[in-house]
Amino acid sequence: MDRNELYEPMDEDKQGTNSYNICNPATFQELLDEYGNKFDDQQVINLVATNANSEWKNRKDIKPLGAIFAKHKAKLGLIESSVEAKKQEADKFVDEVVKAARNTSPTGITEEPDGYTLWKPTGDGRVIPKRLTNFVFKNIRTIQMDSEEKVLLVDIKCETQAVGKNIILDADRTVERKKLLATLRKQVPEANIITTKTEEIDALMTYVAKQAQGTATIEDYMGMFYHNESEKYYFVINKVGGGYTYIKPSTMNVPDSDLVLIKGRRHESNQVSVRNVLSDTSWYNAATELLSLVPASLKNHKSLLMLSWFFAALVSPWMHRELGLKLPILFIYGEPGGGKSTNLNLITTFFGNPNNDSVSMSSTNQPIRDAMSCTNAFAMLTTEYNDKANNITSIIFMLKTLYDRSSYSRGQLDRNDNYPLQAPWIMQGNMRVNNQAVQERMLQILIQKSDQSLDRKTINQALQRKLENTKFIEGYLPYLLDRQDQWKDWHEKALLYVPEDIDSRQLDITTTLTIGLMMIQDLRRTLGMAEYTAQEIGQVIGQITQSRLQNQIQPQHIQFLEHLQTYHTDPQIYSKKVNGVSETYGFVFNQAWWLNKYEDFCKGKGNDFDKNVILEGLKKLGVTTNKTISVRGNNAKCIAFNPHELEKVTQGIIEADAWVENPQQIVVDYDFKTESEDDAKQPKLTIN
């Protein structure tokens, strides 16, 4: 079909129908006798439906035509001539006419197999058909964009051939013929897309919008998703060579077209991909290799702890949605040559990243943001982290947001770009992370040369089998989805091992990792491998606690007390009369002044500061807060405590002898924003 043919009225046969009063059964019969063998069912239905919009009031008016149409088809041998067969055909005809009439716009647009038709009324009561396009939209859905604008998501058929899928059409692209043509031709360049004049496009797209069935969900990341109707979780994962595939539980009989649609550029940053989805047991050998080799590669269960994190990452969206648990950032650090990268590379080959692709932590913010938002379940490997990076402030903010699985908004000239920072994040470096706020959101594991328990040759041989290793993830993901009814059991079993006397953030971290360990335990049972004993599980959890104690800075209220202890002897501060000693209350400090100064200090360091958390922690230690006391003649709300009692409740962390009643003239630098780590490590000043 060329452009001139499209813009002209339709063929002579359809023009001839204008002389018939379709509303009259007798003339409808004449029309079928003359043209019935030239039109298909849909064309006849559209002719009737166009008139039904204005001429007929209800189904009763259409039934006589249905009976005529059924007899006509029986006469041609297209249906059986039995009474029952003709009745079924007549009822079907009425239903289709009513449906078509409901979907026909006031301008009289109908859908033909090879394009849209506009039925234009004439002054004498007739309608003239005119072809609008040589294509039709199929599988029409609506989607909600970030801008809160609802747009159309369509497939397209051109001259009866399917040529495009999942094309987004917003209002700006559909109101003008030029823009609509440009969009469609860009999406399906191989098709000869043609439309009619501009003034008729708006009416056409109004008609198309009415055909929308349901709302589609579009995301720009890979990982785990939840299907509300089936109440099942499923995975979407990149395919080796391009595109992506859906992995669903075997009991989830939902077509892919009803699931989330992945569009955009960010998901392409995801490092995990599969060649196949294995529903048999051919992946068992790779699973046995993984569970035999990795836990034995490092001493003190360090590699098993790392592996537990990888397993937990796969169900971290479920843990966050259903349990409110947050997966920690995994940070592996230690001396060069200690085996950090080797052990991480070994594990990632089993989890769908055989080439050990990684994100550079020294790059600009944009690729880091993209990587943090490209998946919610598949581990993202990064290169060496450095506290001295030029964009360290931005990185710290993004890491904190990532742990919370929150969105990061970046303003553009005409919009805000939202990044759902959520990727299971792996970092590595020679030294531990010094930023307290990030530390508390991490599991930091120190790996040294002395931790190695397998020879280099064994590890290298396993790395050379990396393509065979990837079979693990190809089989484990469907296996995992088919065990959704056991996920809550894994959580309940994990809680039996998790200590109760730990803070909320450590509780989250320990619980998520223990769930990962329960997943390993389940798989070992399936493979016929020996399960871990309660003692061994306890040792792994002990390693979690040990790792956090080894690296974590004290809670905020303890750090605040250490800060008071360090700087209360400064003569310049002492002269401000913001601290002193009371016979009744012991050491007293102007609460507002010291909290404000400590907040400045934390901002300069990028550390967490929460006044309520600090005051609540102090109260638990028996420290008096919000008490109006005279501080060397100045009344103010104060923090007050007995130093010897404080030493007892802090188990000696805050030493009583380090508090000084009458500071000597000793100069102490008090630069909250530039204090170095070495300064902070100076011994506490004690004056007898």
Image: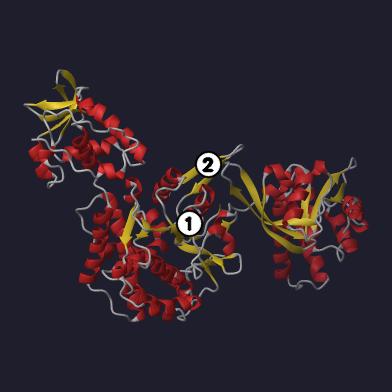
Query: Circle 2 sits in a helix, a strand or a loop, which is it?
Result: strand
Q: Quadrant of the C terminus?
A: top left
Disc 2 marks which amino acid?
Arg
Sooner in the amino-acid sequence: mark 2 or mark 1: 1
**Front disc: 2 or 1:** 2
Residue 54 visible in rendering: no
In the figure, residue 551 lies in which quadrant?
Answer: bottom left
Q: Residue at x 30, y 75 (%)?
A: 453
| Disc 2 to disc 1: CB gap under 8 Å | no
In the figure, residue 494 lies in which quadrant?
Answer: bottom left
Disc 1 marks which amino acid?
Asn
Q: Position of residue 179 (x, y in %)?
A: 76, 45
Q: Position of residue 510 (x, y in %)?
A: 28, 58
Compared across the picture, whether 540 is left or right of 336 comes to left
What's the mark number on residue 228?
Answer: 1
Compared across the picture, whether 166 is left or right of 625 comes to right
Report the coloring of the rendering. secondary structure
Query: Circle 1 sits in a helix, a strand or a loop, which is it?
Result: loop
Q: Position of residue 237 (x, y in %)?
A: 52, 64
What's the mark number on residue 410?
Answer: 2
Q: Nearer the viewer, residue 114 or 162?
A: 162
